[in-house]
Amino acid sequence: MSTNRKKYRVRCIKCGGSFQDIETLCPMCGGLCLIEYEKIEIPTNKKRSIWRYIDGLPIRNEPIISLEEGFTPLISARKINKKLGLKNLYIKDETRNPMGAFIDRGMSVEITKFKEKYKHFVCPTLGDTGASISAYCARAGIKSTIYVPEKTNIGKLYQMLLCGAHVNIVRSFEAALYFAETHRKEARVFSEASPYYMEGIKTIAYEIAEQLKWISPDYIIVPMGTGALITAIYKGFRELLDAEKIDTIPRLVGVQIEGADAISRAFKNEEEDNKLVSTTFAIDLHIERPIWRDPALLAIKKTHGLAISIENSLIPEFIKLLAETEGIIAEPAAIVSIIALSYLIRDGSILPSEKVVSVITGSGLKTIDILMSMIPLEKFSKKIIGSTPKAEIKRLGETKIRILQILSKEPMHGYKIKKMLKNIFGIDISFPTIYQHLQDLLEYGLVSRITKQKKKRTQYYYI
């Protein structure tokens, strides 16, 4: 590990104020801040993680908290190239991070920087950020409290719970923000406004450049929620240019979902839509007020890039396409960069010969509920239990799926199944209906039944 740590300052991008060390927003004007280094150099060491670039990170003598995040592969996407009409598409596969998302990079730097000062981190989240912070807090041996809205993907909730986080489910992301703030006096309330978090995710730029032998691609396509990722990637490439490691900065393309696209609308000078789309597969992009909107717009404009919005309905089709062609299972918020690419090829914005990097920001294995909705359940069930008379299933509805999820944990009797359905999933149905569902599942061969005799005979169902 290098001991030649670079001197840095924290500078407000709104008022220009410069500070030795601040934790989040500018104390003078409340503006967003970024780290600036006295001298930009991009040395590397032998580590295969973000800490390969430790001399370009704002860490002095703090013990590093790492799960070997970063140094993810840059894959030449030969098969999907043909499908989309490209010759030089590369995929930066961030699904390979410890918790399955690019956010792990930023969280490693964030927890490393503040774990000595704070023994409790609180995080309002739509999913991935909470999963990541819970893992890194567990690694550091400190407490985490997470607030999530009701629609959070169940796979991400399990990640948080398994890592020992105290998880609170609230009605909306705005409520999550409110409740997180109530911990401000006794804990560090994490925000993507943290300049130290931004330093972790900028390493995506360093890696792409190094993996392409310090020759920039023509385009980099990035999903946008808060706008933090595209801002950080621009910062990383700008530092590489200042250090004379590259000759040009790639054109940056930011992608949002129609109806949750404040940054894209601002780029096109369209009126802001005050009504968010009511439902979207890409929950993590469902941001009403992106805090990095203006810096993201600046990054796009400075690189002569683009901001576009894609149709939510295309997400399942393209998740399937990427999985079938390249074996990469992307989460809905990640696949938007591939969908955008199909738009840009079709309208001639990107030429077939140009070198393009698409950032796949997170793993679809974290969103198993979305994947389940994409495959017809009768087809899925037949593949698993075979084509027997018991396998002739017309359809499994939501209630049967929830019963199977409940029974996957432990055998249960009908009364407890009814209680769990109501408490966990809000499904309140009568006992006769419960037993009809269970009888159907027995006939399908998806559950079994055993009778236990204690004070009275009780039937338990199990998988």
Image: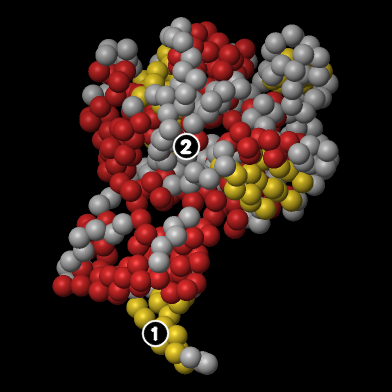
Name the residue rendered at 46%, 26% in the picture. Answer: 276
Q: Nearer the viewer, residue 215 or 331?
A: 331
Please state the horizontal and vertical placement of residue 137, each as a whole percent of the image: 70, 48
Element class at badge 1 = strand
Q: Is residue 153 above or below residue 223?
A: below
- In the displayed structure, 440 sits above or below 378; it is below
Mark 1 neighbour density, 10 Å: few (under 14) some (14–19) many (20 or more): few
Q: Which residue is mark 2?
A: 283
Q: CA distance from mark 1 to mark 2?
A: 40 Å
Residue type at the position of mark 1: Ile
The image quadrant that residue 240 belongs to is top right
Question: Nearer the viewer's eye, disc 1 or disc 2?
Answer: 1
- Please name whichever residue, 68 or 187, is drawn nearer the observer in this view of the structure: 187
Image color mode: secondary structure
Q: Position of residue 456 (x, y in %)?
A: 48, 91
Residue type for callout 2: Ile
Q: Tell me the quadrant of the picture where the N terminus can be found.
A: top right
Quadrant of residue 341 within the rendered picture? top left
In the image, residue 221 above or below residue 368: above
Determine the image quadrant of residue 180.
Answer: top right
On residue 450, the disc is 1
Q: Which residue is painted at 46% across and 67% down in the image?
A: 418
Q: Which mark is residue 309?
A: none
